[in-house]
Structures are given as C-alpha cells and as structure tokens.
Amino acid sequence: MKLLDGNRNNRILVVDDNEAIHEDFRKILLSNGKTGAEVDQLADALFDETTVDGPLLDFQTTHALQGQEALQLVLKSLDDGLSFAVAFVDVRMPPGWNGIETVERIWQHDDEIEVVLCTAYSDFSWEEIAGRLTQPERLLILRKPFDPLEVRQLAYGLTAKWFLRRQAACRMQDLEIMVEERMSELELLRARLDQVTAQQRAANSV
C-alpha cells in the first residue's frame, strides 16, 4: 500500500453518458463561487478544519462517458499511483455497461474507491444493489436532479473518508512492520542466549 504524503486525495471520477451532466459537475466541483463557499463553511464545521485565506478547495475531476472508459481510467490511475478517492457513476448509460456493472468492474481492481450512484429512476432496489455490489458501506445513492450543495458536501465527506481509511490502514501496516521487526530481534536474542547457554554448559563439563 502506498503511504500517504499528508495531502488529501481530491481526485474524483465522473461517469455519465450525458455531456451536460459532466459540465454540471465541473461547475459544482471546480467552482470558487457562492456554492463552494457555503460548503467550505459546512466542511469546517463537520471536520473541524480551520478556514484559511486563499482559493477554495477545488476537486480534480476526470470524466468518462461510458463504463468501459471509466474502468480504463481507473486502471491508469492505479498504474500512475494516483488513484481516485470518489466516483460519481450514472446508473443508465446506454449502450454500454450500466452503473451497477461499471462499479462491479471498478471494485474488482480498486476496492477502496468511494462510489456515488446517480439515478433519476428506480432501476434497482437497494436489496438488488447491495446483493451485486459487495461493499455497500462504500456506496451512496444520489437522486437526480441533484442539488449542487449536496454534491460538494458528498465530495468533501467521501474524500475525507477515503483519506482517513487509507491513513488508518497505513498506520496498521506500520504497526505490523514494527511487530515483525521486534519479533525478529527477539528471535536473534533467543538464539544468542541459547548459544551462550550451550557454551557455558560445554565449559562446565570440562
């Protein structure tokens, strides 16, 4: 697992067959206007962050029109060591994979990414979705038409969740390495002690 450098992962993948939806996401997630300021204030309250002077937090968005394209982008991001923290995925994307299949295939390669399924219809029940997608704790449903404030709030919350989970996993990995190193040191110490004991017995038997 790649260790964190202390910077939050703000990379977001948007998957939708409608170009207009992509433009909406760009306006919402890359905007420094009133909507962004409102959500920045909300994030300060939720995550105990200190507001600083300067530009508001912008998310790095990457866009795909079909599920197949999205999967290729995810694979490339993993190869580059720049994985996405969140994916907003539309449920209906003819003629290719629907959103459920897209998420299934993405999670086969990157099971850490947080997913928001965007839908205007009741295409699948929650039971059907949870039955096919094996990590429902990393899945949220966003109904269309969505509110810009809600989208940015989800982006803030889920990127923070991704970072905290990765941070905890890295700390656990560090702890496991420390335990292994200590066990190796103890094994060496025990071997040395056995050697000294054997030498003392040999000397006493003379």
Image (tube, grey):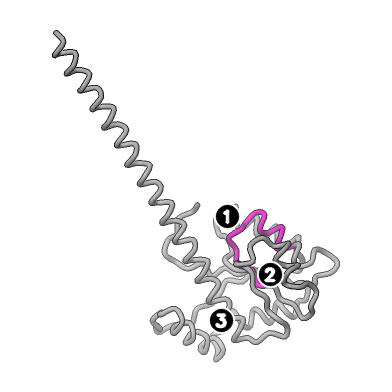
Identified at 58% across, 83% down, the residue is 31
Position of the C terminus by quadrant: top left
Task: Name the foreground residue: 111 vs 24.
Answer: 111
Q: Helix, strand, or loop for circle 3? A: helix
Dot 3 corresponds to which residue?
153
Q: Relative to 46, is 138 on the left or the right? A: right
Q: Residue furthest top?
A: 206
Dot 2 corresponds to which residue?
63
Task: Name the foreground residue: 176 vs 92.
Answer: 176
| First to last magenta residue range | 102-116
Q: Relative to 5, is 35 on the left or the right? A: right
Whether 167 is drawn above or below 174: the answer is: below
- The span from disc 1 to disc 2 (Cα, nearest Å) is 17 Å
Amino acid at pointer 2: His
Whether 31 is drawn above or below 129: the answer is: below
First in residue order: circle 2 vs circle 3 = 2
- The span from disc 3 to disc 1 (Cα, nearest Å) is 27 Å
Please name which of the two marks, 2 or 3, marks the residue nearer to the observer.
3
First in residue order: circle 3 vs circle 1 = 1
Q: Helix, strand, or loop for circle 1? A: loop
Labelled disc at residue 80? 1
Amino acid at pointer 1: Asp
Across and down, in percent, residue 74 comes to 65, 59
